[in-house]
Image (tube, rainbow, N blue to C red):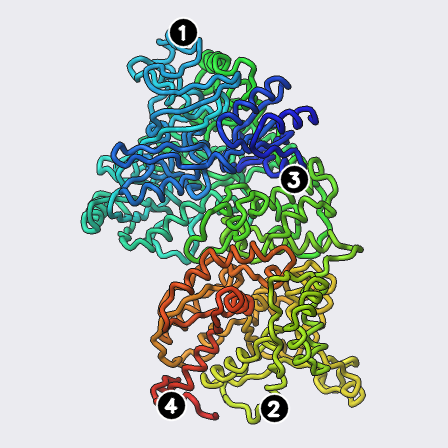
């Protein structure tokens, strides 16, 4: 392999990577299968592709082209060289709006083509649910379809010409009329015309096998169309000419409710004469309960288009009238349609978990039958599942008769894998009995190729092998896929994982306490590999900043998988490959909510760092920033805030201090408050508010760095009629006496003064032993509070998220942890739940800023939205992450990535805001990033409302629990 690597480096201008980390990233796609490559090459152009093929042919090493790695049948993995086209060969070469064509490179992501075509009123017709990360090369290799294939067909229907390099280095331009056909292909076809005319089922989603019938003379002998769906086994695509279609100016969505999926399936074919753009089916199992849908146990999403909104709506209403439904609705607003399509697009991930949390897997993801047969097929399919004791929830392209499903196969034991094989064989026979295709979208790959003889017969499969031999006589390209396949139950990715539980610190309640099961959550659909943050979404900011797979949630999960497997990444928790990949994880927790399967990479990172540095010296930043609460408390005790602030402004001192502390030299050290929040609290005089008691959590940031937020929150909470208290700060050393509540005088004299702490900085740096000590001490202090029903208000979103999420998962053996987590409320939540009649002051101003990533991922912002609306603060906060993310943006070598994250959405939204806009930023990190990178002061919502109270007192216009005027401020 060293000779191979050396020759490739001499021959190729692109990237050649044989290191363990690069190989580990591509051992899997989105399937059940795993193959370990010897190296990864990112070619810069077609010459690089030809050079790779020449070197690999000389060494007898196979080559596998790879796009976004979202294939579900295992065809994007290989044991030789993996060609990564996403790095360089990813451009839109040309777009001709008049001819409605585009010239694309194989690594171009579909959404980039759609964005370029949209200003011309055009689009690419096929649109798989992975459109934000799948590539045109992968779509051509699999002949992908998507939701709109009932209107615009498959990828093959949109291909006009292909530039291909064969395994032996021949460069061909494929097209109709035998254009670009390799020697021997025409003779092969002309000798088998009768078989080709009768051996292929007629249905819209027949993707299985090679499309040799496209070479029939009556079909134009289209070599390019025949090449589509060949899964990288015939040649390597370097450029494609594709057709575009006219996009409807307006769309509407008819949502049709049916009793069950079979009823929905039977209705789908009857709607096709009305020429909808899409007919998608889903059952209730995959739909979040909060989503407002018409009544029913299953739904069809039927999209219509038109030149105007009225025309699109009229067509949708026609479909509703024509459908025999339980209930129906027509959605015309764009936001509502996007929300519903998001549910459908996320199904490939959400379907990997059954309602009871059981894992479910692909493998029989996209069989297709004639649309008129879909209802009977689904009934037979359900019966077959039941006969094998399996469960699955079908969904997908009902208008095309194509069904997606994830099934709760046991792929971890020999008995379970045996059942997987038996079910697969019987299901293949069932699909064929209904006149269907084993693959209706994602290709055969390793999952179904072994069963192709059941669909086509041995003679047709032998013809496929002969065609492969014409194109690739050395079997260099993606061997074991489509023809001469490996067994469908071999090479499963789960086989290499440890069978015994791994000793870990967190509880992983959603995965039965099993870290291996937590890592298995990532099925590779790559929702994290997006170029822009969509709407309120956060995941994955570091990937968007670098474009490197290792910095995506999927890439990190793959490395952790290989770390557990121990074959490629061999040094376990000490792995430098894993550490380097996790180094740029911002611990934003965006994946916890935005990943369809709920991967929580922030927790996995903390777990890894805990083990990686066990018994070893840590980076300086772990001591300086990871133990920030300790240092700030000492500064407060000795009253040294002014001295620290002055020293931080002396250039040489600041530079040395930052270097010693592992802090980015580009950063300014935030100023410490000379008077902490709790000192202000002790000296504030009479306490206002006479209503329900709430306990205000003095987090480290509010206490030492922005006490103005705490002061403002107290004012607003008391104006709302709430009685505010702070947590206890005395920890008794003795046992209680008497009634169990009183303490002896000696116990009071020996009590230790402590501070509550959420442990966030310890958790984010993986100092989990310290975090547990801090959190147990906090629970001891909070004992009296937990005996009451008082809520705990936490102003800093990251601290609230740590208490709600990290605390019960880290101290899963302490019931007090769950009780405290259940008490934690955000500022807006406590006002909504415990002062429901209070009305905030009307401010009537626009707002800009960013929803805190932890609020988005863990806490939710519904209450905040309602509070802002009640206060007249209009506007949507952006998604993404500010990039500072606690200690991340202060870390050595993190500054550029931190700034890139901020420049994605936060800073542009602030720069483009009007002069009267309020810049909201509830997180201290977000406010610091705004100040240091944009010179803008962001404010917590509590500060904005407190200021509004002052203004309304002056003009007498503030609202309150009793209506207009004075009662709102009683007691002040």
Q: Where residue 459 appears, x then y in whole percent?
A: 46, 11
Disc 3: which residue: 21
Residue 806 vertical position relative to residue 211 in the rendered view, above or below: below
Which-is-in-front pick, marks 1 and 3? 3
Q: Secondary structure at mark 3?
A: helix
Q: For the residues marked 1 and 3, what is the alpha-carbon distance in whole angstroms? A: 46 Å
**Chain-order first, disc 2 or disc 4:** 2
Residue 220 left/right relative to 931: left
Disc 2: which residue: 683
Q: Residues within 10 Å of mark 1 (few under 14, many from 20)?
A: few
Q: Where residue 33 appears, x then y in whole percent?
A: 58, 33
Disc 4: which residue: 954
* Proximity of marks 1 and 4: CB atoms separated by less than 8 Å: no
Q: Secondary structure at mark 4?
A: helix
Q: Residues within 10 Å of mark 3 (few under 14, many from 20)?
A: many
**Chain-order first, disc 1 or disc 3:** 3
Q: Where residue 179 appears, x then y in whole percent?
A: 36, 16
Q: For the residues marked 1 and 4, what is the alpha-carbon distance in whole angstroms? A: 92 Å
Residue 430 vertical position relative to residue 274 in the rendered view, above or below: above
**Chain-order first, disc 3 or disc 4:** 3
Q: For the residues marked 2 and 3, what is the alpha-carbon distance in whole angstroms? A: 57 Å
Q: Secondary structure at mark 2?
A: loop
Image quarter where the N terminus lies is top right
Q: For the residues marked 2 and 4, what is the alpha-carbon distance in whole angstroms? A: 26 Å
**Chain-order first, disc 2 or disc 1:** 1
Quadrant of the rendered structure where residue 92 is?
top left
Residue at the image position 18 percent from the left and 47 percent from the top: 311
Residue at the image position 50 percent from the left and 40 percent from the top: 391
Q: Which mark is residue 187?
A: 1
């Amino acid at each position: 392999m060293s000779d191979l690597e050396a020759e490739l480096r001499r021959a190729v201008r692109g990237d050649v990577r044989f290191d363990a980390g690069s190989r580990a990233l591509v051992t899997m796609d989105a399937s059940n299968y795993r193959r370990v490559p010897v190296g990864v090459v990112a070619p810069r152009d077609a010459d690089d592709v030809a050079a790779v093929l020449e070197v690999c042919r000389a060494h007898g090493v196979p080559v596998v082209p790879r796009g976004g790695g979202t294939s579900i049948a295992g065809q994007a993995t290989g044991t030789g060289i993996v060609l990564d086209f996403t790095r360089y060969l990813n451009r839109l070469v040309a777009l001709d709006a008049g001819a409605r064509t585009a010239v694309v490179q194989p690594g171009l992501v579909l959404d980039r083509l759609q964005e370029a075509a949209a200003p011309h009123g055009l689009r690419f017709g096929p649109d798989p649910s992975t459109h934000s990360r799948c590539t045109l090369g992968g779509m051509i290799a699999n002949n992908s379809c998507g939701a709109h294939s009932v209107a615009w067909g498959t990828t093959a229907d949109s291909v006009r010409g292909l530039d291909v390099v064969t395994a032996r280095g021949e460069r061909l331009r494929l097209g109709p009329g035998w254009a670009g056909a390799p020697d021997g292909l025409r003779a092969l076809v002309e000798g088998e015309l009768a078989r080709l005319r009768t051996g292929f089922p007629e249905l819209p989603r027949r993707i299985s096998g090679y499309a040799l019938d496209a070479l029939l003379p009556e079909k134009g002998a289209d070599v390019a169309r025949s090449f589509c769906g060949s899964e990288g086994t015939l040649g390597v695509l370097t450029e494609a000419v594709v057709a575009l279609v006219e996009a409807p100016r307006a769309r509407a969505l008819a949502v049709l409710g049916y009793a069950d999926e079979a009823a929905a399936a039977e209705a789908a074919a009857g709607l096709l004469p009305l020429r909808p753009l899409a007919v998608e089916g889903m059952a209730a199992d995959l739909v979040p309960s909060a989503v407002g849908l018409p009544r029913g146990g299953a739904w069809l999403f039927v999209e219509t288009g038109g030149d105007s909104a009225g025309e699109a709506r009229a067509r949708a209403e026609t479909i509703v009238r024509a459908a025999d439904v339980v209930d129906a609705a027509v959605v015309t607003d764009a936001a509502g349609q996007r929300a519903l399509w998001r549910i459908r697009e996320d199904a490939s991930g959400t379907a990997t978990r059954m309602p009871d949390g059981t894992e479910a897997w692909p493998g029989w993801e996209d069989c297709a039958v004639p649309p008129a047969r879909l209802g009977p097929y689904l009934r037979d399919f359900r019966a077959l599942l039941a006969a094998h004791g399996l469960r699955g929830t079908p969904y997908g392209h009902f208008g095309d008769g194509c069904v997606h499903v994830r099934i709760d196969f046991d792929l971890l034991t020999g008995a379970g894998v045996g059942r997987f094989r038996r079910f697969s064989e019987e299901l293949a026979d069932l699909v064929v009995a209904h006149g269907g295709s084993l693959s209706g979208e994602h290709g055969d790959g390793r999952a179904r190729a072994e069963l192709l003889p059941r669909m086509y017969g041995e003679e047709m499969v032998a013809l496929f092998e002969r065609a492969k031999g014409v194109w690739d006589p050395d079997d260099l390209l993606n061997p074991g896929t489509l023809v001469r396949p490996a067994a469908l139950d071999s090479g499963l990715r789960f086989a290499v994982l440890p069978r015994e539980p791994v000793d870990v610190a967190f509880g992983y309640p959603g995965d039965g306490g099993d870290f291996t099961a937590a890592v298995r959550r990532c099925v590779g659909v790559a929702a994290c590999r997006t170029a822009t943050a969509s709407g309120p979404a956060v995941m994955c900011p570091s990937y968007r900043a670098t474009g490197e797979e290792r910095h995506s949630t999927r890439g990190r999960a793959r490395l952790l998988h290989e770390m557990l497997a121990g074959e490629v990444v061999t040094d376990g928790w000490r792995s430098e490959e894993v550490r380097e990949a996790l180094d740029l994880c911002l611990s934003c927790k965006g994946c916890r909510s935005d990943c369809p399967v709920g991967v929580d990479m922030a927790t996995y990172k903390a777990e890894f760092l805990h083990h990686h540095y066990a018994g070893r010296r840590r980076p300086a930043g772990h001591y300086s920033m990871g133990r920030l609460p300790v240092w700030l408390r000492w500064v407060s005790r000795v009253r040294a805030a002014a001295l620290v602030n002055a020293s931080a402004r002396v250039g040489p001192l600041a530079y040395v201090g930052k270097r010693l502390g592992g802090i980015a030299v580009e950063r300014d050290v935030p100023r410490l408050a000379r008077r902490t929040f709790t000192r202000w609290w002790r000296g504030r005089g009479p306490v206002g508010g006479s209503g329900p008691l709430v306990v205000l959590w003095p987090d480290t940031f509010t206490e030492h760095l922005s006490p103005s937020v705490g002061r403002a929150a107290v004012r607003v909470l008391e104006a709302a009629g709430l009685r505010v208290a702070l947590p206890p700060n005395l920890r008794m050393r003795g046992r209680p006496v008497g009634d169990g509540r009183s303490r002896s005088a000696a116990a009071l004299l020996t009590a230790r003064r402590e501070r509550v702490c959420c442990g966030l900085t310890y958790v984010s740096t993986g100092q989990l032993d310290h975090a547990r000590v801090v959190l147990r001490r906090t629970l001891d202090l909070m004992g009296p509070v937990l005996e009451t029903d008082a809520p705990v208000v936490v102003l800093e979103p990251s601290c609230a998220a740590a208490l709600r999420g990290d605390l019960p998962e880290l101290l899963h053996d302490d019931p007090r942890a769950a009780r405290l987590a259940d008490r934690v409320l955000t500022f807006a939540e406590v006002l909504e739940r415990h002062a429901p009649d209070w009305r905030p002051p009307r401010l009537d101003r626009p707002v800009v800023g960013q929803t805190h990533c932890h609020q988005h991922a863990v806490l939710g912002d519904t209450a905040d939205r309602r509070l802002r609306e009640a206060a007249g603060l209009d506007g949507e906060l952006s998604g993404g992450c500010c990039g500072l993310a606690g200690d991340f943006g202060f870390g050595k070598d993190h500054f550029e990535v931190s700034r890139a994250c901020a420049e994605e959405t936060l800073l542009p939204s602030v720069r483009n805001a009007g002069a009267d806009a309020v810049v909201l930023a509830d997180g201290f990190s977000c406010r610091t990033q705004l100040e240091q990178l944009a010179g803008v002061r962001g404010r917590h919502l509590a500060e904005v409302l407190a200021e509004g109270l002052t203004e309304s007192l002056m003009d007498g216009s503030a609202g309150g629990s009793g209506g207009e005027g004075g009662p709102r401020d009683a007691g002040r």
